[in-house]
Amino acid sequence: EIVLTQSPATLSVSPGEGATLSCRASQSVNRNFAWYQQKPGQAPRLLIYGASTGATGIPARFVASGSGTEFTLTITSLQSEDFAVYYCQQYNNWPLTFGGGTKVEIK
Amino acid sequence: EVQLLESGGGLVQPGGSLSLSCAASGFTFRNYAMTWVRQAPGKGLEWVSIISGSGDNTYYTDSMKGRFTISRDNSKNTLYLQLNSLGADDTAVYYCAKGSSSWYFPYFDYWGQGALVTVSS
């Protein structure tokens, strides 16, 4: 099973600032990698797939990169609606796995 | 507009069973794999199971293999999850989600709002 390790667990950021989230895979997942956003009481929402492609309707301030075992999600100029938990997911191998999440909170 | 609506959640005693459903609309259901993902209270996402668009292929996380059964009825545009031998650690919100492809290694582009399953005596 591929283990995804997200860091940091919590990120405190002021509105308008940028934030960089990381996810490391225990073995290569190529670019079969996604990011999801989850707000309290809501279902997850797909942000990024293919390691760097934005899903439909996702603002351009969400920028993702990486391949193999190292991936990053950068949110430039955080808006109030961006404070949430972010999960990474690999879909290169069975079983599909999620990272433990990074909570982006207001500083 | 893609919509996924889960039902069937509730309170069940330890060792009991429950069946979840997910009614899908807004896309050609048979063309896409469907999955269940769960989230225990205050915890992260845990992938449970997946079924191919045709229903011929399934995969489960090891810890749920043999206890949970995923199925689908393409004539009713509905996904199912049968949960048996439930324990307290199965307490979670169970989400259904649409895969991006018919089978191999999809990401999940649309999610339902979830069904809460509580296992308690």
Image (cartoon, helix red, strand yellow):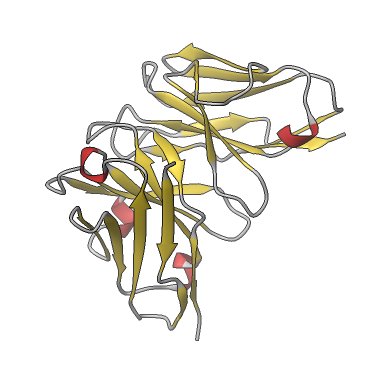
Residue B103 position by quadrant: top left
Q: Nearer the viewer, residue A50 or B111?
A: B111
Residue B26 position by quadrant: top left
Q: Is residue B51 above or below residue B40?
A: above
Q: Is residue A35 above or below residue A66?
A: below
The single residue placed furthest to the bottom in the displayed view is B121
Question: On the picture, is B75 further left or further right than B117?
Answer: left
Taking the spot 48% from the left edge, 72% from the top edge, the residue there is B88
Residue B28 on image: x %, y %:
26, 41
Q: Nearer the viewer, residue B88 or A58?
A: A58
Q: Is residue B6 above or below residue B87?
A: above
The quadrant the N terminus of chain B occupies is: top left
Residue A38 on image: x %, y %:
61, 42
Q: Nearer the viewer, residue A24 or B28?
A: B28
Taking the spot 36% from the left edge, 49% from the top edge, the residue there is B25
Taking the spot 63% from the left edge, 56% from the top edge, the residue there is B42
Question: On the picture, is B57 further left or further right than A57?
Answer: left
